[in-house]
Amino acid sequence: MTFHINERLILINTEEAKKLSLAELFKRLSSNEKGLSTSEAEKRLQQFGPNEIPEKKVNLIIKFLGYFWGPIPWMIEAAVAVSAIIQHWIDFGIIFVLLMVNAVVGFWQ
């Protein structure tokens, strides 16, 4: 956390905050047990922005295709390809369906 209080920059990381007493932490953050006043909260919101971690957007198609990437999926995909090449269609169908079910279940979870 970084706070700019009283025209000076105060840097407090999580580990340091754990070591401080509650009274010292309140003092360093210019707060108290009752929290910030509405005007101080609005001032800090304007100054520092909202206290949130931005959510990373993931492309769902890329995420789904990721379940077909890796050593185990490659072996299963190779088995599907070999089954198609030697025209064992029942094996091809079973292996392909299991590969798709694995990807769908992984994606859904």
Image (cartoon, rainbow, N blue to C red):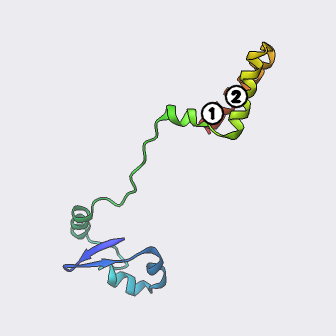
In the image, residue 79 sits, relative to residue 17, either above or below, namely: above
Residue 68 is marked as 1
Residue name at image x 77 percent, y 21 percent:
94
At numbered mark 2, what does the secondary structure look like: helix, strand or loop? helix
Residue 77 is marked as 2
Between 91 and 30, the one lying in front of the other is: 91
Residue name at image x 53 percent, y 37 percent:
63
Tell me which numbered mark, 2 or 1, is placed earlier along the sequence: 1
Is 88 left or right of 9, judged from the image as shown?
Answer: right
Amino acid type, residue under disc 2 in the picture: Glu
In the image, residue 9 sits, relative to residue 83, either above or below, namely: below
Residue 25 is marked as none
- Position of residue 104 measured from the top left corner of the image (x, y, whole percent): 63, 31
Q: Quadrant of residue 78?
A: top right
Residue name at image x 26 percent, y 64 percent:
48
Amino acid type, residue under disc 1 in the picture: Phe
- Position of residue 2 measured from the top left corner of the image (x, y, whole percent): 32, 72
Label 2 close to label 1 by CB (< 8 Å): yes
In the image, residue 104 sits, relative to residue 25, either above or below, namely: above
Is 70 left or right of 92, judged from the image as shown?
Answer: left
- Position of residue 92 measured from the top left corner of the image (x, y, whole percent): 76, 19
Between 89 and 24, the one lying in front of the other is: 89
At numbered mark 1, what does the secondary structure look like: helix, strand or loop? helix
- Position of residue 86 measured from the top left corner of the image (x, y, whole percent): 79, 15
Q: Residues within 10 Å of mark 2 (few under 14, many from 20)?
A: some
**Image quadrant for the C terminus?**
top right
Residue name at image x 73 percent, y 31 percent:
76
**Image quadrant for the N terminus?**
bottom left
Between 32 and 64, the one lying in front of the other is: 64
